[in-house]
Amino acid sequence: MQEAEEWSQRMSGGTAAFSNVTVSKPQPAEADASRPTLSYSRAYTLALSPQLIYARSSFLQHLVSSRVYRQLDFLAVGSWWVYAPNAEDETSASGQAARSGVLMKVPNGREDVFQDHDLDFKAKRALMKFLRFIGDYEQQPEVWEEHRQQPFPAFLSRHFKVPAALQGPLLALTLSPSRSDHTTTEYALPRIARHLRSIGIFGAGFGAVIPKWGGLAEITQVACRACAVGGGVYVLGKGLASEGMEKTEGGTKLRLKDGEAVTAKWIVGGSSSTQTDDTYCRSMTVASSALTPLFPPIAEEAPPPAAAVVVFPSGSLSLASQTSELPPVHIVVHSSDTGECPAGQSKSHQLFLHLLL
């Protein structure tokens, strides 16, 4: 936590990657000193870019082939939830309409659809038709190719007759940062297919895992140790000079900021000069609650879930200052089993995309 505060101060002036970074720690009043408070600083691990690793992802295959996975602990990602507004809004004490709703559990497959008593026969039939299609959609280009650049909700409505109320759970599985009308069929299909095909690979009822003790940071440290054992060299805290790359016969010559030069065959990274019209807003929150209802048992003999995904679809949230439809908000909730916070608390990471139009 202390390092997070120091980092936020360094980023206060804004950088190419981050801007408007703040850390807030509400302090209870003296009269209410019995309320839970934060633990000591090192009891928390805050990941700037938390991630889910699907069983069918190529990244996981590399962790296995490199044997790096042997030094890591992985935990199951449990239920996926999607927010569904009620048909009738409640009225607040001020007389203004206040939105209310419920969190619906996203079905993991055909069995969950059959067992859902809230769905009528027509809705189940539409979902089952789509699930049969997504199982081998690559072999059915005649069904979706002409719709690849169309909004995914329109494809669901026209071709599978999926009601609008049931499109939210399918869109949630895509983890698309864009509004529903900006999420294309071409974008959505492979992501939903990967989610469904990953279920059951490591155990019944789940298809994704998260690394324990800090996510990508932990994977990076383990990879560096494996590199050293294998005879490689890794160096921290050295950046490239402004004109630091030069093509040579043996590869690419890199000039570091301290004047040292090295030659590499492969270069992996990103350019900080890349301009984008999209701004991602992130928030990490520590809650003084275990949020137990979000972590129901996955299935018989399945490991206890350590993470849950909650999706607020585009249009389900609103701001008084925003007239257009807001993009979706994705919340990844981690329990204390991840080692990122003390027992009895939980940590969540919120992400939404603000489109600069």
Image (cartoon, rainbow, N blue to C red):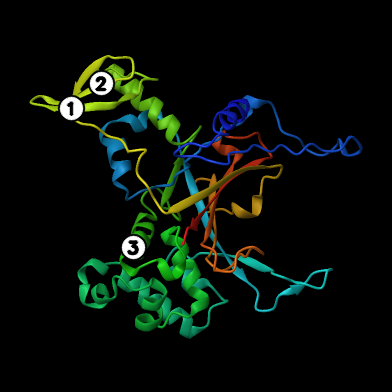
Residue 274 or 110: which is nearer the viewer?
274
**Where does label 2 land, which residue?**
255
Task: Determine whether, in the image, residue 73 is placed left or right of residue 289.
Answer: left
Q: Amino acid at mark 1?
A: Glu
Seen at 25% across and 19% down, the residue is 230
**Where does label 3 land, which residue?**
187
Residue 305 visible: no
Q: Amino acid at mark 2?
A: Arg
**Residue sitting at the far bottom:** 122
Residue 163 or 264: which is nearer the viewer?
264
Residue 170 image point, x, y percent: 44, 67
Which secondary structure lies at badge 3?
helix
**Mark pair 3, 2: CA separation:** 39 Å
**Where does label 1 land, which residue?**
246
Which secondary structure lies at badge 1?
strand
Q: Do callouts 1 and 2 mark residues in contact (Cβ within 8 Å)?
A: yes
Residue 174 or 255: which is nearer the viewer?
255
Q: Which numbered disc flags the more N-terminal residue, 3 or 2?
A: 3
Which secondary structure lies at badge 2?
strand
Q: How many marks?
A: 3
**Quarter-wise, where is residue 289 in the image?**
top right
Seen at 36% across and 74% down, the residue is 130
Residue 340 image point, x, y percent: 57, 34
